Amino acid sequence: MIKTDTLIIGAGPVGLFCVHQLGIIGLKCEVVDNLDKIGGQCIELYPDKPIYDIPAVPKCTGEGLTNNLIKQIEPFKPNFYLGERVQEIKKLKKKWIVKTNKGSEFEVSSIIIAAGVGSFEPRKFPTKDAEKYEGKQVLYSIKDKKIFKNKTVVIFGGGDSALDWAIELSNTSKIILVHRRDEFRGMQASIDKVNQLKDEGKIDVYKKYQLNSVIGKEKVESITIKHDDDTIKEIKTNYVLGFFGLIMQLGPITEWGLNLDKKTIPVNTENFETNKEGIFAIGDICSYPGKLKLILSGFHEGALAARGCFKYAKPEEKLRFEFTTTSKAAQERLGVKK
């Protein structure tokens, strides 16, 4: 059982900034996210896309913003539980007991839901025999591209992720790109590059094909792909990558007794608390009159929610508002050297 002040559900920009806001008022937290990396939508959907509406930052990327937020919260040493989904919450006296689908268990005085529009899950191959190799030779994201060096890799998909990785990995791997349609739907520059690499013999491309079966014992040995005309082709491979986009859904949140409005969680605007005492919601998942789905709005919501958590973590103490420029306690927590 992991005991801390607050559990944040969601490691996107809003959740990360909330770690900072909790830290400067002396509260500890842990962070759980269903994705296998920190950054939420910014990293999963648009790591290289320019963002223009972060205060005092004329232009940044999703990845750049995430990296700076991670650096900002380093003094507070939060622990991240990635690739885990909060499955169950229950109230025990004045504490919340939270369990994830991977068996992590937390005892906290408050919970902050910063889950964007819900949990993100990759769209997977419908082929049942692919499940056996998931996380091993069948992958839906890439953590370390070095594992593919000098290997044969079959990439499925027709969007930017599939095209970009096909181009990137073609430098060190034998790449076979498979798309179920006749035309790719990524950026034209990427499509042109893939066609160039195909002409140079560096990428094999199969269109109007889909995964039919995965063959192997302990490891993937080969796959078969099926054409629209029912033709079957077998390909020997070491890895199978699927890039079909993400499924966004609320998941178990719908079972927590929150007063849901469609796919959002209504909150008050004093501290962004939900209808459940000690549970707060910030970012795209919360709703209130005048709500704007902007990262900067989420930062504001996180700042107030963090202070709302204080009374649950330290009910005998009174939180005194201070600016970080003058608060010695906050500066000490941030590691500011005089």
Image (cartoon, rainbow, N blue to C red):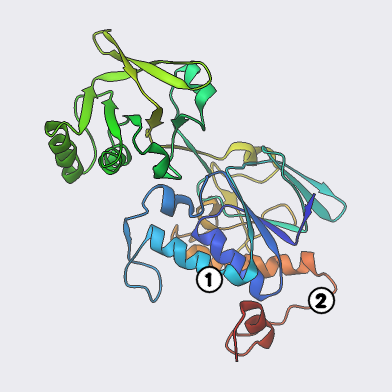
Q: Nearer the viewer, mark 2 or mark 1?
A: 1
Q: Nearer the viewer, residue 225 or 249?
A: 225
Report the residue at 40% width, 73% height from top.
55
Left or right for 239, reference 100? left
Circle 2: residue type:
Glu
* Distance from the alpha carbon under mark 2 to that under mark 1: 26 Å
Circle 1: element type: helix
- Which of the two labelled residues, at mark 2 and mark 1, occupies the earlier sequence position? 1
Q: Nearer the viewer, residue 195 or 270?
A: 195
Q: Position of residue 242 (x, y in %)?
A: 39, 31
Report the residue at 54% width, 22% height from top.
132
Q: Position of residue 130 (x, y in %)?
A: 47, 21
Left or right for 197, reference 212? left
Q: Look at the image and tell me whether residue 279 can be seen.
A: no
Circle 1: residue type:
Gln
Report the residue at 72% width, 39% height from top.
103
Report the residue at 55% width, 50% height from top.
115
The residue identified by callout 2 is: 317
